[in-house]
Image: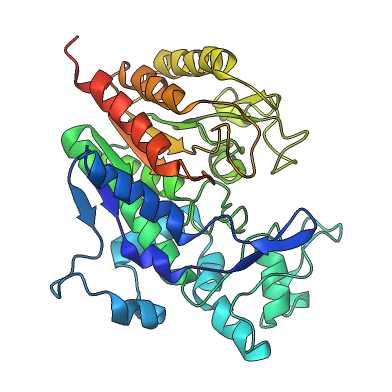
Amino acid sequence: MKTVYSPLHIAHAPKMEFFRGRTVECFENPERALRILKEINKRKLGDVIVLPPSSQSDDYSQLLIEPALIEPSLELLKLINTVHDRDYVEFVRTIFHDWHREVPMQSYALPHTLNRLGRDNINLDNINLKNPYAKLGYYSFDVCTPITAGTWAAAISSAWCAVRGQEIVREEGMAFALCRPPGHHAHPNMCGGYCFFNNAAIAAEAFHQHDPTALIAILDVDYHHGNGTQAIFYDRKDVLYLSIHGDPANNYPYFLGFSDEIGEGDAEGFNVNFPLPQNTQWPDYCRTLDRSLDLIQSQNPGYLIVSLGVDTFKDDGISQFLLESSDFIELGKRIGLRKWPTLFVMEGGYHDQIGETVVNVLQGFQASFCASV
């Protein structure tokens, strides 16, 4: 299985976040992706495609020093703008520099107020969105997603990894996009949950661009509900979204991810949530996984995207499921048995065994997918 990776994720390295009422070191950090990459190379999973290709001995130092130099291709930008509002994309590109002029001594930006003042249809003419504080509050839905000088570069390269991954899937049947920052919490016009661009949704749009009649299934196995992915496709029946996650009654994102959220209009039934209680172990998780896969099978998908979070591991720093390392091998095998062309897109996972658990899923999948029927 080929992996798509960009070292430009390192440009996004905030030091602190606001978590459960206190300031702590960021859980979402460059070390996560580096550990996964190290394990991929250690176990010889397959070729690693590096973006952007370098003709200078993989020297990305100038781009990391000047992340504003990163500009997406017109094709990639078009895909991102299909998923996200143009004004929001411009916000991600410019907000740190706007904010840094106001607070030059701080290396990351966080909102201190959010758009929760009781008006659903805000007249933007009344809001000064040239004010960086207003922008941060308008385009964010939480206060745990810091933005730095390198966030734009990392977010663009992360989306690029997902798009390149779907190209490989169309050619070879499987691929892993080692995306960082993650994406499944990102709404069309809001960042949150460490996410800026919704990589899985962007990949789904890329699949549709090349095969407009195919149903795309997205299976989200991250511990936290992919509220952004749900919001993007909630009224569309060309994308089937299923999520297995910690019950939002007690877990982030708290306000979406309940079982009665089933899609709307013609897309009713194309959004399926399986909230599970804290301390869920493999037997119960496995039954829910098989049920999800059966539902996907009933819709005869053209492609599967797996939003791969491994924060369901028992020792994760911010989650409360109890899966063992070996369970991730079985998770991958069960998906691979279905033989769907599959793109894995990296999401969450905040523990020292992130490399091991991720590669367990990928190797389990590959073993089943490549086995003769």
For residue 179, say whether it is visible: no
For residue 325, say whether it is visible: yes
Report the front residue among 39 and 124.
Answer: 39
Specify the color scheme. rainbow
Report the front residue among 15 and 120.
Answer: 15
User: Residue sitting at 72 percent across and 77 percent down?
Assistant: 133
Residue 111 is left or right of residue 159, and the answer is right
User: Residue sitting at 34 percent across and 40 percent down?
Assistant: 208
Residue 165, how many percent across, how many down?
A: 28, 46
Q: Quadrant of residue 368?
A: top left
Report the front residue among 204 and 325.
Answer: 325
Taking 215 as reference, is 161 above or below it? below
Residue 163, how many percent across, how many down?
A: 31, 50
Q: Which residue lies most toward the top here? A: 373
Taking 145 as reference, is 101 above or below it? below
Report the front residue among 112 and 272.
Answer: 112
Q: Which residue lies most toward the right here? A: 118
User: Residue sitting at 50 percent across and 68 percent down?
Assistant: 13
Q: Quadrant of the C terminus?
A: top left
Residue 371, how many percent across, how many down?
A: 19, 16
Residue 120 is left or right of residue 3, and the answer is right
User: Residue sitting at 48 percent across and 45 percent down?
Assistant: 352
Residue 308, how many percent across, how many down?
A: 45, 37
Q: Quadrant of the N terminus?
A: top left
Residue 129 is left or right of residue 122, and the answer is left
Q: Quadrant of residue 46?
A: top left
Residue 180 is left or right of residue 26, and the answer is left
Q: How many marks?
A: 0
